Amino acid sequence: MLTLDMDNLPPNFQEIIKHEHEVVANWQKEGILEHLFLRPTLNGAVLIFTGMDELQVRELMTTLPLYPLSKSIEYFPLLKQF
């Protein structure tokens, strides 16, 4: 779960968002991002990855254009039941 620091957005925030969408779309095409949920407050998102361990996800998250603007990132390893 990624939460953005909405009080300190740079002037080029819209450009960063556009690049973020491209990166996330590529992850989906590659089959490593199973789901993306935006938070109702629009200050973050929940990303569900597949076929990766927590360390891989942590490394991948650092490549997001929004990563430097994050206020917090929480990782929850999950076991899919169905």
Image (spheres, rainbow, N blue to C red):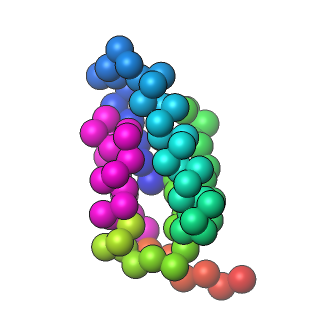
Near-viewer residue (19 or 59): 19
Question: Eyeballing the image, is 40 above or below 9?
Answer: below
Whole-percent x, y for residue 62 in the image: 30, 53
Near-viewer residue (10 or 74): 10
Query: Which span is picked out in magenta?
Result: 58-76
Q: Residue furthest top?
A: 11
Confirm whether residue 32 shows in the render: yes
Verify whether residue 63 appears in magenta.
Answer: yes
Verify whether residue 20 appears in magenta.
Answer: no
How many numbered discs sit on the rendered protein? Answer: 0
Whole-percent x, y for residue 25 in the image: 59, 50
For the point 54% across and 43% down, the residue is 22
| Location of residue 13 by image quarter | top left
Is 67 placed left or right of 47 in the picture?
left
For the point 35% across and 72% down, the residue is 56
Whole-percent x, y for residue 61 in the image: 37, 56
| Location of residue 70 by image quarter | top left
Question: Eyeballing the image, is 80 above or below 64?
Answer: below
Please identify the quadrant where the C terminus is shown.
bottom right
Confirm whether residue 7 shows in the render: no
Near-viewer residue (72 or 17): 17
For the point 52% across and 32% down, the residue is 18
Is 72 placed left or right of 32 in the picture?
left
Is 4 placed left or right of 43 in the picture?
left
For the point 54% across and 59% down, the residue is 27
